[in-house]
Image (tube, grey):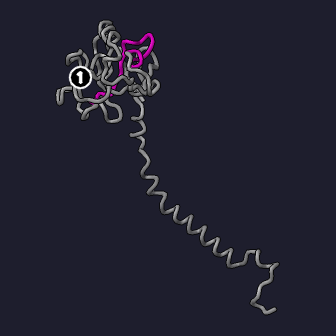
């Protein structure tokens, strides 16, 4: 047997060259990760963005019939303490009369019907409604307590929303969306 021939007993064992290939490959992977990490890391949201992920709003000053607009994630959010009459009007609407029968509420099942209760703060707090204040047609900010249904009216293209933020007339295809929110006390709402 010549010195360049290999035997079957040595063919499966790693050689020094195999070891060098493996170490060089691992060093290349570690080097590529070290170079790429700063670029990947800079894409994470900064602390100020993460702080806006949720906000707390004190609503103690809102008497029935009053509204408040706050900014959350760069969007206006309407908070309204509705009167008993507004809640009664919203409850009186037949679901068959709605243009969009889906609740559009992140707090409930995505297929829930757009009842007033499903869009409000829930049992015992039906008078409170929290909605993202951007018209679902082209993103304009609707005017509060306006329009044919006493809710919100988008003067840009004529969308009319009722007191529960449900689209009733006009080009808007869906109800005003309800973000995730909860009462953390009797007077504080956490959005997000």
The residue under the point 35% across, 27% down is 177
Q: Is residue 101 left or right of residue 109?
A: left
The residue under the point 56% across, 64% down is 30
Q: Is residue 131 magenta?
A: yes
Which span is picked out in magenta? 116-135
> Whole-percent x and y of residue 73?
35, 35
Pointer 1 residue: 169
Number of labels in the image equals 1
Mark 1 neighbour class, 10 Å CA radius: few under 14, some 14 to 19, many 20 or more: some
> Whole-percent x and y of residue 64?
31, 10
Residue 124: which quarter of the image? top left
- In the picture, the quarter occupied by the N terminus is bottom right
- Residue 63 visible in the picture: no
User: The residue tagged with tag 1: helix, strand or loop?
Assistant: strand
Q: Is residue 183 magenta?
A: no
> Whole-percent x and y of residue 158?
18, 26
Residue furthest bottom as drawn: 2
């Amino acid at each position: 047997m010549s010195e360049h021939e290999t035997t079957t007993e040595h063919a499966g064992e790693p050689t020094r060259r195999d070891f060098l290939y493996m170490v060089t490959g691992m060093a290349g992977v570690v080097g590529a990760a070290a170079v790429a990490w700063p670029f990947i890391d800079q894409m994470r949201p900064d602390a100020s963005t993460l702080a806006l992920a949720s906000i707390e709003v004190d609503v103690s000053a809102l008497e029935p019939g009053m509204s408040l607009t706050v900014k959350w994630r760069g969007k206006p959010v309407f908070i309204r303490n509705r009167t008993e009459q507004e809640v009664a009007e919203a409850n009186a609407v037949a679901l068959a009369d709605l243009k969009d029968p889906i609740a559009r509420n992140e707090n409930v099942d995505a297929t829930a019907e757009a009842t007033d209760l499903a869009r409000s703060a829930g049992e015992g707090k039906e008078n409170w409604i929290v909605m993202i204040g951007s018209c679902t047609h082209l993103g304009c900010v609707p005017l509060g307590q306006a329009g044919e249904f006493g809710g919100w009216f988008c003067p840009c293209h004529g969308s009319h929303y009722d007191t529960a933020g449900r689209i009733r007339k006009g080009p808007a295809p869906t109800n005003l969306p309800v973000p995730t929110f909860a009462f953390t006390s009797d007077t504080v709402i956490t959005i997000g």
